Image (cartoon, rainbow, N blue to C red):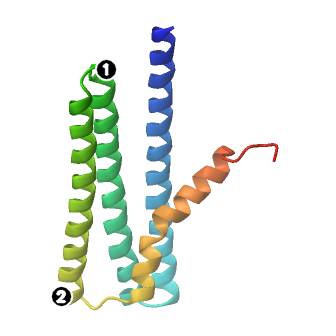
Amino acid sequence: MNEQGGASGVRATANDASMARQVLLCSVLLLGILVAVCWYLQDWSFARSILIGGLLVNGSFWLLKKDAQRLMQRISEADEHVAAGINFEKTRFILRSFARLVVLGLLLFVLASQVPINVIGLTLGFATVMFSVVIIGLHTGKCWMPSKV
């Protein structure tokens, strides 16, 4: 019974990694389309702001994906009796996520002081991952709500 649960856990992890990869790919594709269209319709300043926001958020999402995979791998490899090690890994994950947010804010501050940034374009760039999650979620047809209410 334990082996069966382990095999389904491996499949679920592989499926989640595939879905995260699809979200990242869709986000980069959406970013490219947005930058090209806005460069054509608006100007390079607006398209550059979208590009900056999209690169920052996609890089952050990619690092978050790697950290989440590392956390799941270390928790699955940990012995059941080592609760302190699991709590340490969870704390480390949270601290790394917070540090990534601080570095992202500092990087954005440095970029904004060096390059003129359009706030609307930056926000559109930041939203590419969110739009990709919605697109991939609707495409896969997964329903997180119960079917009978």
Residue 148: percent from left, percent from top? 82, 43
Residue 53: percent from left, percent from top? 36, 74
Q: Earlier in the sequence, mark 1 or mark 2?
A: 1
Up/down of 97 relative to 131, above or below: above
**Residue 141: image tag:** none
Amino acid at circle 1: Glu
Up/down of 76 relative to 7, above or below: below
**Residue 80: image tag:** 1
Q: Quadrant of residue 99?
A: bottom left
Amino acid at circle 2: Gln
Residue 60: percent from left, percent from top? 31, 60
Circle 1 crowding by C-alpha within 10 Å: few under 14, some 14–19, many from 20? few
Q: Nearer the viewer, mark 1 or mark 2?
A: 1
Circle 2 crowding by C-alpha within 10 Å: few under 14, some 14–19, many from 20? few
Disc 2 on helix, strand or loop? helix
At 50% across and 29% down in the image, what residue appears? 12
Which residue has dot 2 on it? 114
Q: Is residue 82 left or right of residue 6?
A: left
At 39% across and 80% down in the image, what residue appears? 122
Q: Quadrant of residue 86?
A: top left
Q: Quadrant of residue 97?
A: bottom left
